[in-house]
Amino acid sequence: MGGTGTIDPVQTSLTTYARIALAVYVLALAVVLFQPTPEIASGTVLGVDDLLVRFGFPEAWVAPGRVEFVLNALMFAPVPFLGAWVFPGLRWTDWVAYTFLASSAVELTQGVLLSARSAQFVDIVANTLGGVIGAGVIAIVVALLPGAAWLPRQRT
C-alpha cells in the first residue's frame, strides 16, 4: 500500500514474482537436501571443484571440502533474499535465525531418517552463513536505496 491507501502495482507484482521464485527455489532445495543418497550433492561438489581447477584456481583453494562449504553457503543465500519481498516485516536477524533453524532441521533429518546421508555441524554453519549473506545483501540494498519503491520495506 502506498501512503494514500492505494495498492502499488509494482510492489504487488514483485511480491507475486518473489513468492513464486521462493516457492520454486525452496522446492528445488528440498529435492536436493532430502535425496536419500548423496550422489547429487557429491557430484555437484566434484564438478564445481573440477571446473575451478580447470579455470586455474590452485588445488589447495578448491579442495572438495572447501568447495562444499562455499556451495552450502551459496545454496541458502537466496532464501532470505527472496523472502524479504514475501515477508517484508522480518528483520535480517530473523532470517539468520530461521536459516539456522531450517539448516539444523535438515541435518537432523538427514542424520536420523536418511541413512546414506551424513549430518554435519559444518553444514549448519555454512548454511547459516548463507542466510547471513542473503539477508545482508538485501539489508545493504535497502539501506543504499531507501527511496526505491520496488524494495521491500523491512523493520529496523
Image: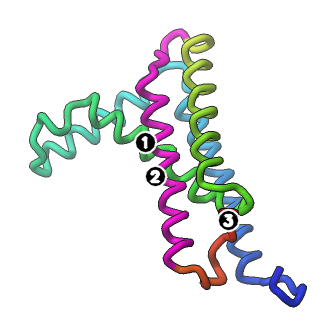
Q: For mark 2, give the secondary structure.
A: helix
Task: For marks 2 and 1, give the CA distance.
Answer: 8 Å
The amino acid type, in three-letter code, at marker 3 is Gln
| Residue drawn at (65%, 63%) of the image | 156
Confirm or deny contact between disc 2 and disc 3 (CB under 8 A): no
| Rendering coords of residue 2 (x, y %) | 81, 84
Which stretch did the figure color magenta? 115-144
The quarter holding residue 5 reads bottom right
* Furthest residue in direction front, as rendered: 156
Residue assigned mark 1: 73
* 72 sits left or right of 60 in the view: right
Membership of 118 in magenta stretch: yes
Q: For mark 3, give the secondary structure.
A: loop
The quarter holding residue 70 reads top left
* Furthest residue in direction bottom, as rendered: 4
* 128 sits left or right of 58 in the view: right
Residue assigned mark 2: 133
**Dot 3 crowding, Cα within 10 Å, few <14, some 14–19, many 20+:** some
Magenta residues: mostly which secondary structure? helix
Residue assigned mark 3: 154
The quarter holding residue 10 reads bottom right
Task: For marks 1 and 3, give the CA distance.
Answer: 23 Å
> Who is closer to the viewer here, 34 or 101?
101
Among numbered discs 2 and 1, the one appearing first in the sequence:
1
Number of marks in the image?
Answer: 3
| Residue drawn at (64%, 79%) of the image | 150
